[in-house]
Image (spheres, rainbow, N blue to C red):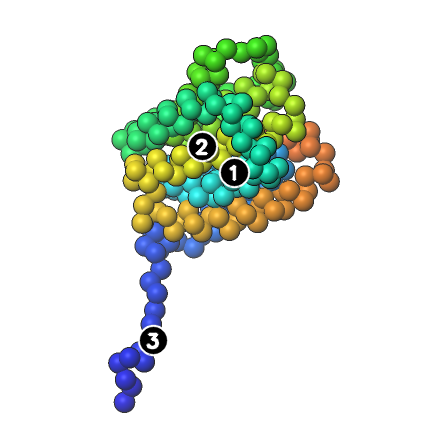
């Protein structure tokens, strides 16, 4: 007779995985892998790739939840790559940008669960298209000695779209480019801004309910492909023509952003 205490113990699969199915999870894995690859090579765009790709196979709120933990991990690595002292210096230099961005991010994150899906598509797709079009056309704004007010406004705008979509790269990159930030410093500063933003995003969406017991397993699972992609991207960074790859990436993001706008307008 088989004793009760020797019965097989099974661990139920999280409900979200059963709902999405194997095919959707595999596609999500590949999209996140690609996002991590780009992040490793150019220092940004992983959330843009993930939100643009994942919203074609799952609900916007779930796509946002999926990118939260991978984004937190990837940006933490980028922020601390040159050491804590360099990161601390960047925090002091861009304190107004960070303070305004993090405050607005915490507020806008609470809108995610009440905004209609089509509005979210437009709010996500619009900045992506604007940023990629600007980069593809070669237009680079210039700001000499920007005021604290301008820094705060740009930071607040970055936080606003960041709270809604997990994407704060477009206004951040545009601002850093406009003030002629050296390339080496820009990579570190982006990491610090995105890293703190990702931490705030995680906290904000734990409060908003986007990241919860039901969705957290999916976000945790996406850490693996994001990490693999970033690891590969960092190693390919010096081996291919960055200009060609950057243009190809921007074209993909531009098309993805247009598709989000189309879905927002036409459903």
Q: CA distance from mark 1 to mark 2?
A: 9 Å
Q: Quadrant of the C terminus?
A: top left
Q: Which residue is depicted at the point 48% across and 40% down?
A: 71
Residue lying farthest to the front in this orientation: 85
**Eye-nearest disc, 3 or 2:** 2
Q: Which residue is mark 1?
A: 75
Q: Quadrant of the N terminus?
A: bottom left
Q: Is residue 266 above or below residue 143?
A: below
Label 3 Cα neighbours within 10 Å, binned few <14 / some 14-19 / many ≥20: few
Image side of residue 167 versus residue 139, left or right = left
Residue 133, image x and y in percent? 56, 21
| Mark 1 or mark 3, earlier in chain | 3
Taking depth in this image into account, of 138 and 44 the one nearest to the observer is 44
**Eye-nearest disc, 1 or 3:** 1
Q: Which residue is mark 2?
A: 197
Residue 9 in sight here: yes
Label 2 Cα neighbours within 10 Å, binned few <14 / some 14-19 / many ≥20: many
The answer to the question of whether label 1 and label 2 lie on touching residues, with beta carbons closer than 8 A, is yes
Q: Secondary structure at mark 1?
A: helix
Q: CA distance from mark 1 to mark 3?
A: 41 Å
| Mark 3 or mark 2, earlier in chain | 3
Q: Which residue is depicted at the point 32% across and 27% down?
A: 107
| Mark 1 or mark 2, earlier in chain | 1
Residue 120 in sight here: no
Tag of residue 8: 3
Residue 125, image x and y in percent? 45, 27
Residue 37, image x and y in percent? 59, 42
Image side of residue 57 versus residue 180, left or right = left
Where residue 144 sits, quadrant-wise, is top right
Q: Which residue is depicted at the point 47% across and 48% down?
A: 222
The answer to the question of whether label 3 and label 2 lie on touching residues, with beta carbons closer than 8 A, is no
Residue lying farthest to the bottom in this orientation: 1
């Amino acid at each position: 007779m088989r004793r009760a205490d020797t019965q097989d113990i099974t661990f139920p699969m999280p409900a979200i995985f059963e709902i999405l199915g194997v095919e959707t999870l595999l596609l999500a894995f590949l999209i996140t892998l690609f996002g991590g690859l780009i992040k490793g090579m150019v220092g940004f765009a992983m959330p843009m790739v993930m939100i643009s790709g994942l919203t074609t196979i799952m609900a916007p709120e779930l796509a946002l939840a999926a990118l939260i933990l991978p984004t937190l991990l990837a940006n933490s690595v980028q922020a601390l790559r040159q050491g804590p002292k360099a990161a601390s210096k960047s925090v002091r230099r861009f304190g107004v940008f960070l303070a305004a961005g993090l405050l607005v991010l915490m507020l806008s994150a609470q809108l995610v669960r009440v905004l209609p899906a089509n509005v979210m598509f437009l709010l996500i797709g619009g900045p992506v298209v604007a940023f990629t079009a600007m980069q593809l056309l070669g237009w680079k704004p210039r700001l000499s000695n920007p005021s604290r007010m301008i820094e705060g406004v740009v930071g607040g705008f970055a936080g606003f779209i960041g709270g809604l979509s997990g994407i704060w790269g477009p206004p951040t990159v545009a601002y850093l480019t406009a003030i002629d930030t050296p390339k080496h410093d820009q990579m570190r500063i982006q990491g610090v801004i995105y890293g703190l933003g990702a931490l705030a995003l995680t906290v904000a969406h734990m409060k908003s309910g986007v990241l919860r017991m039901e969705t957290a397993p999916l976000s945790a699972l996406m850490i693996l492909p994001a990490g693999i992609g970033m690891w590969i991207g960092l190693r390919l960074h010096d081996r291919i023509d960055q200009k060609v790859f950057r243009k190809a990436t921007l074209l993909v993001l531009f098309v993805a952003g247009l598709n989000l706008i189309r879905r927002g307008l036409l459903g």
